[in-house]
Image (cartoon, rainbow, N blue to C red):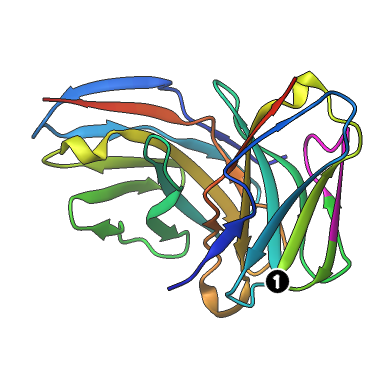
Amino acid sequence: AQTVTQSQPEMSVQEAETVTLSCTYDTSESNYYLFWYKQPPSRQMILVIRQEAYKQQNATENRFSVNFQKAAKSFSLKISDSQLGDTAMYFCAFIPMNRDDKIIFGKGTRLHILP
Amino acid sequence: DVKVTQSSRYLVKRTGEKVFLECVQDMDHENMFWYRQDPGLGLRLIYFSYDVKMKEKGDIPEGYSVSREKKERFSLILESASTNQTSMYLCASSSPQGGATEAFFGQGTRLTVV
């Protein structure tokens, strides 16, 4: 069975600092996608960043970047120059590529950015 | 602008009632999902559908059923609501075509069963 584990239930950092959220996953698939989703308080879940497993280069989106270690099955999210608007629940997610299959989510990390 | 719309943002129902949660997407996505979100438990999959009239059980299907008569609409049904079904319910859609695969979410329905 495929699983996604987020080991940090909650984190707090000061505004402008850099923070890293951890995610590990377990799968026997060789091709898959990984995602980080953000759910701000009382607001809609949105995609932050995605990574295709066949790509060695780590994905980046402005202040958000990932450290993808395929052999270690690790997919961490780094937020640079954190802002108050980054306060949210963050979910790591996995889906096999090119299959009609379910998206598997971790339990989430609640991130607080402190002024 | 892509959209997944859930019919209600907040809902209060009585124990034993039959409850319908509706979800509509305008992206022509094949796959649709119903998740339940509870503190400390993350998102747990209730049911998903990869085509009209097709459905697959997720991790926690007990007490729920679904209906997908049209591609754009996926309904979650609580046959006889119970207090332990008080939760946030999230609908999502995705497509395996074109490499997109990411899920798009609705705004969520917070259901309280009293």
Say whether residue A43 is left or right of residue B80: left
In the rendered view, does B26 fall on the left or right side of B66?
left
Query: Dividing the picture into quarters, in which one does residue B113 lie?
Result: top right
Where, quadrant-wise, is the N terminus of chain A in this rendering?
A: top right
Within the magenta stretch, is there residue A79? no
Between B7 and B92, the one nearer to me in the picture: B7
- Residue B43: percent from the left, percent from the top? 60, 36
Q: Quadrant of residue A20?
A: top left
Residue A23 place in picture, x, y as percent: 44, 35
With respect to residue A26, does A65 lie above or below? below
Instruction: Chain letter for mark 1, please.
Output: B
Does residue A72 appear anywhere in the picture?
no
Q: What type is the residue that disc 1 sits on?
A: Glu
Q: In this image, B109 relative to A6: left or right?
A: right
Residue B29 sits in quarter: bottom right
The image quadrant where one finds the C terminus of chain A is top left
Is there any visible trace of residue B82 in the rendered image? yes
Q: Which residues are magenta?
A: B57-67
Q: Secondary structure at mark 1?
A: loop
* Residue closest to the eye, B97 or A97: B97
**Residue B64 on the magenta span:** yes
Looking at the image, residue B92 sits to the left or right of residue B32; the answer is left
The residue at 42%/37% (across/down) is A42
- Residue B102: percent from the left, percent from the top? 52, 62
Would you name the residue on which mark 1 appears? B72
